[in-house]
Image (cartoon, grey):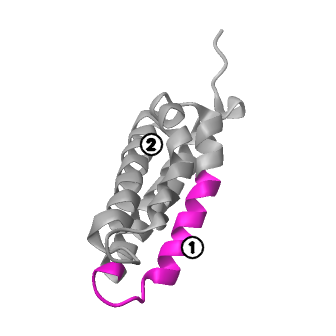
Amino acid sequence: MSPRLLNLVASISLLALIALCALWEGWLAPLRPGGSWMMLKAVPLLPAVFGILRGKRYTHQWVSMLSLLYFTESVLRASDPGLTGVLAGVEIALSVLLFLGTMYYARNTAPSRQVPRE
């Protein structure tokens, strides 16, 4: 896959994961009625937005590791009843897409993989 496509996958999945985290814990299926502080789980993703959108390799590297936390949290909550389980399934998909997009982008843009220009 081309780095441009991988960056697009990472960008879309990052923005969708941020939106999902805020909506899930704020309005759709919060832990407590009226919203919960769990919506702040989207905050660690915010510093990555501009780096991912600009295609910064270092940002892709650390976001690939951060996405595993969201994957873990969603796997633990996937067995919850109702809408929470469904939203956890969506979070699983988005975190896996984010992980794969960032990991392969970082791999494909490594200096060792660049073709030397003559």
- x, y percentage for residue 2? 45, 37
- x, y percentage for residue 42? 48, 55
Q: Name the residue under label 1.
A: 72
Nearest to the observer: residue 25 or residue 92: 25
Give the position of the N terminus as an image quadrant. Answer: top left
Local packing at callout 2 (Cα closer than 10 Å; few below 14, some 14-19, many 20+) is many
Residue found farthest to the top: 118
* Residue 13 highlighted magenta (yes or no): no
Residue shown at 38%/58% (left/top)? 22
Residue shown at 36%/73% (left/top)? 30
Tag nearer the camera, 1 or 2: 1
Image-based side of 111 in relation to 82, left or right = right
Element type at mark 1: helix
Q: Are marks 1 and 2 in contact (CB under 8 Å)?
A: no
Main secondary structure type of the part rendered in magenta: helix
Q: Is residue 38 above or below residue 60?
A: below
